[in-house]
Image (tube, rainbow, N blue to C red):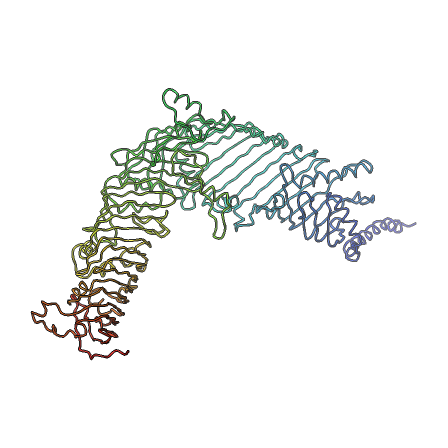
Amino acid sequence: MTNGEESGQKRRPWLRALLAAIAVLLLALFGPPLISINRYKGQITNLVSRSLGRPVHLSSVEARLLPWPGFVLYDLSVAEDPAYGAEPVLHANQVTASLRILPLLVGRPEIATISVDEASLNVVRAGPGRWNLDTLFRTAAAQAGGRAGADSGAPVRLPTFEATDSRVDFKNGVEKLPFSLVDADMTVWQENPGEWRIRLRGQPARTDVSMYLEDTGVVRMEASVRRAPALREMPVHLDLDWRQAQLGQLARLVTGSDSGWRGDLTGELHLDGTADAAHVTTRLRASGVHREEFVPVSPLDFDANCSLLFHYTERSVENVLCDSPIGDGRVRLTGDKPGNDAPPTFTVELNRVPVEAGLDVLRTLRSGLQPDLAAAGTVSGKLEYAERNTAGARPATREKPTGPHRARAAEEEAGPLTGGLTVENLVLTGGGLKRPIQTARIGLAPATWAATRVQAGQGEAAVAGPADDIAGTVAIPAGGATPLVLSLRFSLAGYQIGAHGQASIVRAREIAQAAGIPATAALASLAGDPIAVDLVAQGPWLPAEVIAMGEAAPPETAAASQADKSPAAGTPVSLTTDTLTGTVSVHNANWRADYLANHLQISEATLHLEEGSLRWDPMEFSYGPVKGTATLTLAEGCGQQEGPLCVAELEPSFHVAFGDLDAASVETALLGARERGTLLSTLIERLHPSTAPPWPKMQGTVTASSLALGPVKLEKIKAELEILPDGAEVMGLNAGLLGGSVSLTGTLLKPATDQDKPAYSLTADFENVDAKALGQLLGLRWTGSSVSGNGKVDLAGYTDAELAESAKGRLHIETRIGAIGWPAKAQTEGEPGADEVPGALARFERLTADAVIANGVVTLGQNQIVLAGRKRSVAATVTITDPPEVSFEATKPSVAKR
């Protein structure tokens, strides 16, 4: 054999191997599409089902050889345990199941990896300690252990589960919660027999509100779980962190609404042990925390570290230790929460914590505080919570002990909270305060039964048993004869502050503005003697979530809201909204508005704040020579309106009572010194939006003993009015007129532009008007029975001449037996027209007449004058002047038909 033949034979095995590899490659590339394995779908479904320990459903399957042998499953659904619901625990449109090579070569196929993309996973909690993933892991592990024992004894590894770009939803029983993880990547694999490893990354989301997912942060978890008979017995090691979370979106994620917080939050949690004995450490860091509406010079930052030992079976927590530096001070929390519903015990220590930090926390939780309000001072002390006696309930009410038994009763009724806090060198500046508020020391101590009986304006109020609050008092000078005493009361739920004493109006406005009380601008135009306040403000630290239109609050929430409206000071703070109750008394004050010419003098007024409303009752005032009393009821809040009486978004109601009024005095009061123009022209000009703020919308009643309108006097006036932004409406006016009565309705429309004129529309009914008095008004001698009628008139203008010229309308009058003529004095003096009164008016049995009002003249139209069955009519006109001018024309008699 030659050397060439030997070398050719050596190359043939390599050639055969190359050809075989090419054949296998071609088979891998072109074989699977040509091989239909749908007939093996049942076996593959059974294989996946055995691997997961749950029933599996799929629509179709394809074989795949590269890059690894396996199957591609379409429309895969893994059934849920019926104890946790009917919805599949896992659903994916496409799943790749890779096989292990060695078991496949010996004819025992095993799934190595299950990879899903854009899948949906349901995590269900059916009760305490009952999770659907617990049974899934334990069932799968049991299936693997059973197969291992049935064969050669070699351990069977469970498949690795991989999910990318998927979604994890959470359910509480059959109810799907709005919380989920989106864009989630998850890997679950078996590190060793009986040991599982879990890796998870995703973005928290909420399905019932719109959110910016990029601001909810990223959650990462690394965990290992070892096999055990029950979930609570599994050894667990867990590392969890939540980064890049923005506080506004985080609050929206947790509560469903953005509370206006801004800042970055990072949280870490580490857990080692089992559910029955888990050692937990946490770290929570926040930076740049502030309210949305402003950025403080020093934003609220903190770095809190906590550790505890948690026992799931006993529902207990031991060895709680939290420590965090705050400014130059420190806060430390220690405690325990025993199981079996035993009361907790904890201790809070504050060491020179800056008051500014507390102000930052309050400003972060609540809006309304002035952004430039600053605080100096420190808080130190120690509070311990431990319930002393839980046997038997304390009585709801009891008499206050007196004498030597008082100290012993206070000791017996001491609450679970002991210790105290001290605020030193407190100084509040900014926020509109021209002079700082400062005090050297404020002591805060737990509030007991004996210490919670305080004066609440309407009497003494008491707490039913000890409360878990701390309370204290501080007196600050506020410009009054006596200092303003503040009664402070704080709990974990909220606050309660009582203010009692005197304060100057200017100082009261500054303090209210700094505290964020609305409508403080109302006091800007008020001046006078110091006011006396007896107020209680209380509410939660976190405001209640606003329910959108169309959504109803749960019955228990509505009931709690009504039950929480308690105006008494010293009661436990459990409100869901802020309330301000009590009284404010004003003496010898004056108020000036842009739309009035003079000051409104308030000799005495009392403001009652109750049940979400503000009520001035009574208010004694004078406006120039006009004096009266008023009652005004408003709802809290005022929108954009300004003024001491305008603090309402809802329409206010009022009642104003006057004595005897004179139109000239009213005009002098509204206009000041007499000027050219009229009462209406000047007043409407002042009320015009281009020159002064409009009146707030309100409605109510006005009464007066009398109102003199030149020769006419209205008596016992009662009117129902509604003041509107574009005018006013007289819904009903009743008064005495010329011995009879008149009822009137009407409207006033303000001019829309400077070229327009105010327009009026009046409708009146009058009855039983004295004929003699009506005749005197018209310059006639009229005797007989009373006169009744009705009329309507529309007119516009400012001056008397404009009103008379523009008047258009109708008038109807009726009377029975009577006579009309010129006065005797007019006849003797021989005035012109004294002998022109028609004879038909000399004596009549019935008179009915309809008149037309136009061009400053009242023209008598259709009329009937009946005497002894004979009907006559007269023609007459009344020129609208002061006094009116009456003229008659002769008429022909007419015979009445039988």
* Image location (x, y in percent) of residue 648: 35, 49
* Image location (x, y in percent) of residue 706: 21, 55
Q: Is residue 881 placed above or below 44 in the rendered structure?
A: below
* Image location (x, y in percent) of residue 75: 70, 53
The one nearer the camera, 37 or 172, is: 172
**On the rendered structure, is 510 left or right of 397?**
left
* Residue projecting furthest to the left: 829
> Which residue corresponds to the image point at 33% horizontal and 48% vertical from the top-left?
633
Quadrant in which residue 844 is drawn: bottom left
Q: Is residue 30 placed above or below 339 in the rendered structure?
A: below
* Image location (x, y in percent) of residue 523: 29, 45
Q: Is residue 191 placed above or below 633 in the rendered structure?
A: above
**On the rendered structure, is 764 left or right of 13?**
left
The one nearer the camera, 54 or 219, is: 54
* Residue projecting furthest to the right: 1
The one nearer the camera, 788 or 288, is: 788
Q: Is residue 389 placed above or below 594 in the rendered structure?
A: above
**On the rendered structure, is 631 left or right of 558?**
left
Image quarter hosting the C terminus: bottom left
The one nearer the camera, 629 or 153, is: 629
Quadrant in which residue 890 is drawn: bottom left
